[in-house]
Amino acid sequence: MLRELKKQHALIWAFANRDFATRYRSSVLGWAWSLVQPLATLVIFAAVFSIVFRVQAPVMGNGKTSYAAFLFTGMVTWNLFSGLITLSITQLKSNGELLKKVQFPAYAPVLGASIVQLIQVVLEIVVLLGMFLVLGNVGFTWLVAIPILIGTAFFAQGIGLMLSIMNARFGDVMYIVGVLLGAMYFLTPVLYPMSLVETHSSALAWIVKLNPMSWYVQAMHDAMYTLTAVSLLEVAALLIGGLLVFWAGFVIFNRYSEDIGEML
């Protein structure tokens, strides 16, 4: 797999450069739009859940609380996951005509678009870091966030590769995934702390814990928000788990994309 990706890295970067140049080409604000939507969502959700529903955020590492910082930490992790999946699903069909005319690895446009999505997430992370610096919530545990996010990216990309080939065969997949992601969002401790669910319903808490994204989001909350030391075993499990899902997705994608031109 690594040898194959290295061999095609120039082609993948070519698709990434194309998507990078065209994503906000006709807009005035350009890449600033990549931050407007998540920040607008942050403001709305923070107001609704902290003021209307009075959801209390856990105490930060500095002894203070900030629901906005808690929410944004979870949102950055979730946006990485959902963004990679959503983009991956549509790439084969959007590049269908090109795939019919030119022979090249079908995963190239999928991974190229994902690189652009990663750039957007990096911008969000920079804003998150700035927020914590202003709040004075800084710790060495931040370093653990790097492998956690890498594991999240591999996990999402592996699923995205599998779903993209399914969507090429069955067009309903992208709509089903949209519904599932919407439900999964509320079953991931992004808008609420895990302790709140455990207090009110042990059954629901188990459902939330069965959601793999809950592990990644909770680990990010520990590393970035509460500044709790995440065990090396847990970090290794999240990273290796993500790598294994990516490997499986890559193998499945290659196996079923040989006749991609006919499917599209």
Image (spheres, grey):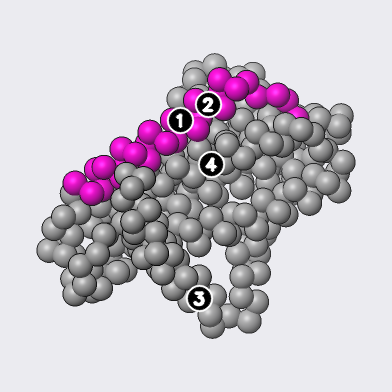
Name the dominant secondary structure of the magenta segment. Answer: helix
* Residue 104 position within the rendered picture, expressed as x and y whole percent measured from the top left: 24, 64
CA distance separating discs 3 and 1: 33 Å
CA distance separating discs 4 and 2: 11 Å
Residue to which mark 4 is pinned: 150
Asked where in the image residue 245 lies, by quadrant, the reply is top left
* Residue 141 position within the rendered picture, expressed as x and y whole percent measured from the top left: 72, 31
**Image side of residue 78 versus residue 15, left or right:** right
Is residue 99 one of those drawn in magenta? no
Mark 1 touching mark 2, by CB under 8 A? yes
Residue to which mark 1 is pinned: 240
Mark 3 touching mark 4, by CB under 8 A? no
Which amino acid does the dot numbered 3 rest on? Ala
Q: Residue at x 80, y 44 (%)?
A: 132
Q: Which residues are magenta?
A: 227-255
Q: Residue at x 57, y 37 (%)?
A: 147
